[in-house]
Protein backbone atom coordinates (compact mmCIF):
# COMPACT_ATOMS: atom_id res chain seq x y z
CA UNK A 1 0.00 0.00 0.00
CA UNK A 2 2.85 2.37 0.77
CA UNK A 3 4.30 1.83 -2.73
CA UNK A 4 0.94 2.00 -4.54
CA UNK A 5 1.24 5.72 -5.46
CA UNK A 6 4.62 5.10 -7.07
CA UNK A 7 3.17 2.07 -8.82
CA UNK A 8 0.27 4.17 -10.14
CA UNK A 9 2.66 6.80 -11.50
CA UNK A 10 4.98 4.20 -13.06
CA UNK A 11 1.98 2.38 -14.54
CA UNK A 12 0.48 5.52 -16.05
CA UNK A 13 3.76 6.40 -17.76
CA UNK A 14 4.25 2.82 -18.99
CA UNK A 15 0.69 2.55 -20.33
CA UNK A 16 1.00 5.87 -22.18
CA UNK A 17 4.37 4.78 -23.60
CA UNK A 18 2.91 1.52 -24.90
CA UNK A 19 0.42 3.47 -27.04
CA UNK A 20 3.17 5.14 -29.08
CA UNK A 21 3.69 3.96 -32.65
CA UNK A 22 6.94 2.16 -33.36
CA UNK A 23 9.21 1.87 -36.37
CA UNK A 24 8.14 -0.63 -39.04
CA UNK A 25 10.78 -3.31 -39.57
CA UNK A 26 9.83 -4.26 -43.13
CA UNK A 27 9.48 -7.91 -42.10
CA UNK A 28 7.02 -9.43 -39.60
CA UNK A 29 7.96 -8.89 -35.95
CA UNK A 30 6.89 -11.51 -33.40
CA UNK A 31 7.46 -10.24 -29.86
CA UNK A 32 7.91 -12.70 -26.99
CA UNK A 33 7.39 -10.88 -23.72
CA UNK A 34 5.80 -11.00 -20.31
CA UNK A 35 3.64 -8.76 -18.18
CA UNK A 36 6.03 -8.55 -15.25
CA UNK A 37 9.66 -8.18 -14.27
CA UNK A 38 11.68 -11.34 -13.79
CA UNK A 39 11.82 -14.57 -15.72
CA UNK A 40 8.88 -16.56 -17.02
CA UNK A 41 10.37 -18.73 -19.76
CA UNK A 42 10.86 -16.25 -22.61
CA UNK A 43 14.20 -17.67 -23.79
CA UNK A 44 13.03 -21.27 -24.36
CA UNK A 45 9.87 -19.87 -25.95
CA UNK A 46 11.92 -17.81 -28.42
CA UNK A 47 13.99 -20.87 -29.35
CA UNK A 48 10.88 -23.03 -29.75
CA UNK A 49 9.32 -20.41 -32.05
CA UNK A 50 12.54 -20.26 -34.07
CA UNK A 51 12.32 -24.04 -34.61
CA UNK A 52 8.67 -23.80 -35.68
CA UNK A 53 9.33 -20.91 -38.06
CA UNK A 54 12.27 -22.72 -39.65
CA UNK A 55 9.96 -25.69 -40.16
CA UNK A 56 7.60 -23.34 -42.02
CA UNK A 57 10.40 -22.33 -44.39
CA UNK A 58 11.11 -18.98 -42.70
CA UNK A 59 14.45 -17.45 -41.72
CA UNK A 60 13.94 -16.18 -38.15
CA UNK A 61 16.50 -13.90 -36.50
CA UNK A 62 16.31 -13.05 -32.81
CA UNK A 63 16.69 -9.42 -31.74
CA UNK A 64 17.54 -8.86 -28.07
CA UNK A 65 18.45 -5.86 -25.96
CA UNK A 66 21.31 -7.90 -24.49
CA UNK A 67 20.46 -7.34 -20.84
CA UNK A 68 23.55 -7.56 -18.65
CA UNK A 69 25.97 -6.96 -21.53
CA UNK A 70 28.06 -3.93 -22.43
CA UNK A 71 27.71 -4.02 -26.23
CA UNK A 72 25.43 -1.28 -27.58
CA UNK A 73 25.03 -2.91 -31.01
CA UNK A 74 23.54 -3.62 -33.34
CA UNK A 75 25.84 -6.61 -33.67
CA UNK A 76 25.35 -10.27 -34.46
CA UNK A 77 26.33 -12.48 -31.54
CA UNK A 78 29.23 -14.82 -32.24
CA UNK A 79 29.66 -17.49 -29.52
CA UNK A 80 33.26 -17.98 -30.64
CA UNK A 81 34.09 -14.32 -30.13
CA UNK A 82 31.69 -12.86 -27.58
CA UNK A 83 31.21 -13.55 -23.86
CA UNK A 84 28.18 -13.03 -21.66
CA UNK A 85 29.64 -9.90 -20.09
CA UNK A 86 29.60 -8.30 -23.56
CA UNK A 87 26.31 -9.45 -25.08
CA UNK A 88 24.33 -10.83 -22.14
CA UNK A 89 23.87 -14.42 -21.02
CA UNK A 90 20.56 -15.10 -22.78
CA UNK A 91 21.66 -13.87 -26.25
CA UNK A 92 24.89 -15.84 -25.94
CA UNK A 93 22.96 -18.98 -25.01
CA UNK A 94 20.43 -18.51 -27.83
CA UNK A 95 23.17 -17.85 -30.40
CA UNK A 96 24.14 -21.53 -30.20
CA UNK A 97 20.72 -22.37 -31.66
CA UNK A 98 19.67 -19.40 -33.82
CA UNK A 99 21.03 -16.14 -35.29
CA UNK A 100 20.88 -13.41 -32.63
CA UNK A 101 21.30 -9.64 -32.96
CA UNK A 102 22.01 -7.59 -29.84
CA UNK A 103 20.94 -3.95 -29.98
CA UNK A 104 19.97 -1.34 -27.42
CA UNK A 105 18.03 0.31 -30.28
CA UNK A 106 15.57 -2.43 -31.22
CA UNK A 107 14.64 -0.77 -34.53
CA UNK A 108 18.32 -0.74 -35.54
CA UNK A 109 18.57 -4.37 -34.47
CA UNK A 110 15.62 -5.31 -36.67
CA UNK A 111 17.17 -3.44 -39.60
CA UNK A 112 20.40 -5.43 -39.22
CA UNK A 113 18.42 -8.67 -38.93
CA UNK A 114 16.61 -7.86 -42.18
CA UNK A 115 19.90 -6.97 -43.88
CA UNK A 116 21.24 -10.38 -42.86
CA UNK A 117 18.35 -12.23 -44.47
CA UNK A 118 15.70 -12.41 -41.77
CA UNK A 119 12.21 -13.16 -43.10
CA UNK A 120 10.82 -12.66 -39.59
CA UNK A 121 12.18 -10.98 -36.46
CA UNK A 122 11.75 -12.70 -33.10
CA UNK A 123 11.86 -9.86 -30.58
CA UNK A 124 13.13 -11.18 -27.26
CA UNK A 125 11.32 -9.05 -24.67
CA UNK A 126 10.35 -5.46 -25.53
CA UNK A 127 6.57 -5.93 -25.23
CA UNK A 128 6.23 -2.68 -23.28
CA UNK A 129 8.85 -0.88 -25.40
CA UNK A 130 7.29 1.11 -28.29
CA UNK A 131 10.45 1.49 -30.42
CA UNK A 132 9.54 -1.31 -32.83
CA UNK A 133 6.08 -2.02 -34.26
CA UNK A 134 4.95 -5.57 -33.46
CA UNK A 135 2.87 -7.75 -35.76
CA UNK A 136 2.25 -10.31 -33.03
CA UNK A 137 2.72 -10.20 -29.26
CA UNK A 138 3.03 -13.58 -27.60
CA UNK A 139 3.13 -13.34 -23.81
CA UNK A 140 4.69 -15.96 -21.55
CA UNK A 141 3.53 -16.51 -17.99
CA UNK A 142 4.36 -19.03 -15.26
CA UNK A 143 1.37 -21.19 -14.33
CA UNK A 144 2.18 -21.20 -10.62
CA UNK A 145 3.34 -17.62 -10.02
CA UNK A 146 1.05 -15.77 -12.40
CA UNK A 147 1.40 -12.02 -11.92
CA UNK A 148 2.00 -12.08 -8.18
CA UNK A 149 -0.05 -9.45 -6.37
CA UNK A 150 -1.09 -7.90 -9.74
CA UNK A 151 0.30 -4.50 -8.71
CA UNK A 152 2.56 -2.34 -10.85
CA UNK A 153 6.24 -1.96 -10.00
CA UNK A 154 7.50 -1.06 -7.40
CA UNK A 155 4.34 -2.10 -5.51
CA UNK A 156 4.34 -5.40 -7.41
CA UNK A 157 5.91 -7.16 -10.37
CA UNK A 158 3.84 -5.74 -13.27
CA UNK A 159 5.65 -3.57 -15.81
CA UNK A 160 2.40 -1.75 -16.69
CA UNK A 161 -1.27 -2.02 -15.63
CA UNK A 162 -2.69 -5.37 -16.68
CA UNK A 163 -5.71 -4.21 -18.79
CA UNK A 164 -3.70 -2.35 -21.48
CA UNK A 165 -1.21 -5.22 -21.59
CA UNK A 166 -3.97 -7.81 -22.06
CA UNK A 167 -5.53 -5.64 -24.79
CA UNK A 168 -2.27 -5.86 -26.78
CA UNK A 169 -1.82 -9.60 -26.30
CA UNK A 170 -2.24 -11.76 -29.41
CA UNK A 171 -1.55 -15.06 -27.64
CA UNK A 172 -0.71 -16.25 -24.12
CA UNK A 173 1.53 -19.21 -23.29
CA UNK A 174 1.09 -20.61 -19.77
CA UNK A 175 4.16 -22.61 -18.78
CA UNK A 176 4.08 -25.41 -16.23
CA UNK A 177 1.49 -26.58 -13.73
CA UNK A 178 -0.54 -24.54 -11.28
CA UNK A 179 -3.44 -22.11 -11.13
CA UNK A 180 -1.68 -18.81 -10.43
CA UNK A 181 -2.25 -17.62 -14.01
CA UNK A 182 -5.86 -18.76 -14.38
CA UNK A 183 -7.33 -15.29 -13.89
CA UNK A 184 -5.02 -13.72 -16.45
CA UNK A 185 -5.64 -16.56 -18.90
CA UNK A 186 -9.40 -16.00 -18.56
CA UNK A 187 -8.94 -12.28 -19.25
CA UNK A 188 -6.85 -12.97 -22.35
CA UNK A 189 -9.38 -15.52 -23.62
CA UNK A 190 -12.22 -13.03 -23.04
CA UNK A 191 -10.22 -10.56 -25.10
CA UNK A 192 -10.37 -13.07 -27.95
CA UNK A 193 -6.75 -14.23 -27.97
CA UNK A 194 -5.74 -17.91 -27.78
CA UNK A 195 -4.27 -19.37 -24.61
CA UNK A 196 -1.87 -22.31 -24.88
CA UNK A 197 -0.22 -24.54 -22.32
CA UNK A 198 3.43 -25.54 -22.51
CA UNK A 199 6.00 -27.29 -20.37
CA UNK A 200 9.76 -27.26 -20.02
CA UNK A 201 11.18 -30.65 -20.96
CA UNK A 202 14.75 -31.41 -19.83
CA UNK A 203 17.22 -33.22 -22.07
CA UNK A 204 16.60 -36.96 -21.52
CA UNK A 205 20.22 -37.96 -22.13
CA UNK A 206 21.51 -35.51 -19.53
CA UNK A 207 18.87 -36.60 -17.03
CA UNK A 208 19.90 -40.21 -17.51
CA UNK A 209 23.49 -39.30 -16.62
CA UNK A 210 22.37 -37.37 -13.54
CA UNK A 211 20.11 -40.08 -12.13
CA UNK A 212 21.84 -42.11 -9.49
CA UNK A 213 24.02 -39.15 -8.51
CA UNK A 214 23.46 -36.85 -5.56
CA UNK A 215 23.62 -33.29 -6.85
CA UNK A 216 24.01 -29.71 -5.70
CA UNK A 217 21.81 -27.61 -7.99
CA UNK A 218 22.49 -23.88 -8.31
CA UNK A 219 20.99 -21.22 -10.55
CA UNK A 220 20.93 -17.47 -11.09
CA UNK A 221 17.72 -17.22 -13.10
CA UNK A 222 14.30 -15.61 -12.65
CA UNK A 223 12.91 -18.65 -10.79
CA UNK A 224 15.65 -20.96 -9.47
CA UNK A 225 13.08 -23.21 -7.80
CA UNK A 226 11.65 -24.09 -11.20
CA UNK A 227 15.06 -25.48 -12.16
CA UNK A 228 15.20 -27.53 -8.96
CA UNK A 229 11.66 -28.81 -9.54
CA UNK A 230 12.57 -29.85 -13.09
CA UNK A 231 15.52 -31.88 -11.83
CA UNK A 232 13.47 -33.60 -9.14
CA UNK A 233 10.61 -34.32 -11.53
CA UNK A 234 13.20 -36.04 -13.75
CA UNK A 235 14.22 -38.39 -10.95
CA UNK A 236 17.40 -36.57 -9.91
CA UNK A 237 18.40 -36.65 -6.25
CA UNK A 238 18.81 -32.95 -5.47
CA UNK A 239 20.53 -33.02 -2.10
CA UNK A 240 21.40 -29.33 -1.85
CA UNK A 241 20.48 -26.10 -3.65
CA UNK A 242 21.87 -22.57 -3.98
CA UNK A 243 19.81 -19.72 -5.45
CA UNK A 244 21.19 -16.48 -6.89
CA UNK A 245 19.60 -13.38 -8.44
CA UNK A 246 18.67 -13.42 -12.12
CA UNK A 247 21.70 -12.76 -14.39
CA UNK A 248 23.99 -13.07 -11.35
CA UNK A 249 27.64 -12.65 -12.30
CA UNK A 250 29.50 -15.28 -10.31
CA UNK A 251 32.75 -14.38 -8.63
CA UNK A 252 35.68 -16.83 -8.46
CA UNK A 253 35.12 -17.04 -4.71
CA UNK A 254 31.48 -18.05 -5.13
CA UNK A 255 32.26 -20.76 -7.66
CA UNK A 256 35.15 -22.04 -5.53
CA UNK A 257 32.78 -22.23 -2.55
CA UNK A 258 30.21 -24.17 -4.59
CA UNK A 259 32.91 -26.58 -5.75
CA UNK A 260 34.16 -27.05 -2.18
CA UNK A 261 30.63 -27.65 -0.85
CA UNK A 262 29.97 -30.21 -3.57
CA UNK A 263 33.23 -32.05 -2.85
CA UNK A 264 32.56 -32.06 0.89
CA UNK A 265 29.21 -33.77 0.34
CA UNK A 266 30.31 -35.96 -2.60
CA UNK A 267 27.82 -34.09 -4.77
CA UNK A 268 27.77 -33.23 -8.47
CA UNK A 269 27.32 -29.56 -9.35
CA UNK A 270 24.47 -28.91 -11.81
CA UNK A 271 23.30 -25.60 -13.28
CA UNK A 272 21.30 -24.13 -16.17
CA UNK A 273 22.43 -23.33 -19.70
CA UNK A 274 21.93 -19.64 -18.96
CA UNK A 275 24.22 -19.79 -15.92
CA UNK A 276 26.82 -21.78 -17.83
CA UNK A 277 26.82 -19.09 -20.53
CA UNK A 278 28.14 -16.69 -17.89
CA UNK A 279 30.47 -19.15 -16.19
CA UNK A 280 31.96 -20.69 -19.33
CA UNK A 281 32.81 -17.33 -20.87
CA UNK A 282 34.56 -15.96 -17.78
CA UNK A 283 38.30 -16.70 -17.88
CA UNK A 284 38.45 -16.46 -14.09
CA UNK A 285 36.03 -19.40 -13.77
CA UNK A 286 37.18 -21.52 -16.70
CA UNK A 287 39.11 -24.01 -14.56
CA UNK A 288 35.89 -24.94 -12.74
CA UNK A 289 33.53 -25.06 -15.73
CA UNK A 290 34.44 -28.64 -16.66
CA UNK A 291 33.35 -29.89 -13.23
CA UNK A 292 29.82 -28.44 -13.55
CA UNK A 293 27.06 -30.31 -15.37
CA UNK A 294 24.50 -28.37 -17.42
CA UNK A 295 20.85 -29.33 -17.91
CA UNK A 296 19.40 -28.06 -21.21
CA UNK A 297 15.61 -27.67 -21.39
CA UNK A 298 13.25 -27.32 -24.32
CA UNK A 299 9.76 -25.82 -24.39
CA UNK A 300 7.04 -28.22 -25.57
CA UNK A 301 3.67 -26.76 -26.60
CA UNK A 302 0.47 -28.73 -26.04
CA UNK A 303 -0.96 -27.32 -29.28
CA UNK A 304 1.79 -26.72 -31.83
CA UNK A 305 -0.75 -26.86 -34.65
CA UNK A 306 -2.70 -23.87 -33.34
CA UNK A 307 0.47 -21.87 -32.75
CA UNK A 308 1.75 -22.62 -36.25
CA UNK A 309 -1.58 -21.55 -37.73
CA UNK A 310 -1.46 -18.23 -35.87
CA UNK A 311 2.13 -17.62 -37.00
Image (cartoon, rainbow, N blue to C red):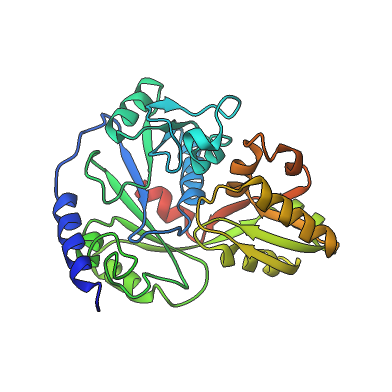
User: In the image, 245: left or right of 277?
Assistant: left
Quarter residue 184 falls in: bottom left
The residue depicted at 49 percent of the width and 76 percent of the height is 178
The residue depicted at 27 percent of the width and 32 percent of the height is 107
> Residue 234: image x %, image y %?
71, 65
| Nearest to the observer: residue 176 or residue 229 | 229
In this rendering, does residue 58 appear at all?
no
User: In the image, 232: left or right of 208?
Assistant: left
| Nearest to the observer: residue 43 or residue 9 | 9
Farthest-out residue, front: 253
User: In the image, 190: left or right of 232?
Assistant: left
Farthest-out residue, top: 115
The residue depicted at 50 percent of the width and 43 percent of the height is 90
Quarter residue 116 falls in: top left
| Nearest to the observer: residue 60 or residue 255 | 255
- Vertical position of residue 275 compared to residue 74: above or below: below
- Vertical position of residue 194 compared to residue 151: above or below: above
Quarter residue 37 falls in: bottom left
> Residue 252: image x %, image y %?
67, 45
Amino acid sequence: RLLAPLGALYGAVAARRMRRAGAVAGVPVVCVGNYHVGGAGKTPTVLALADILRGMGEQPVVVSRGYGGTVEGPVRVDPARHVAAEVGDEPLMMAAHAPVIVARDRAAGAALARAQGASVVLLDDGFQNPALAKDMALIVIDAARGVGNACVFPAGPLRAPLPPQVARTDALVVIGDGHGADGVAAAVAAHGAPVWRARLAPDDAVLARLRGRRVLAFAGIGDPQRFVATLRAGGVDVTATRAFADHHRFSPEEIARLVADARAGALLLVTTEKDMARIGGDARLANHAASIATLPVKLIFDDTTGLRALL
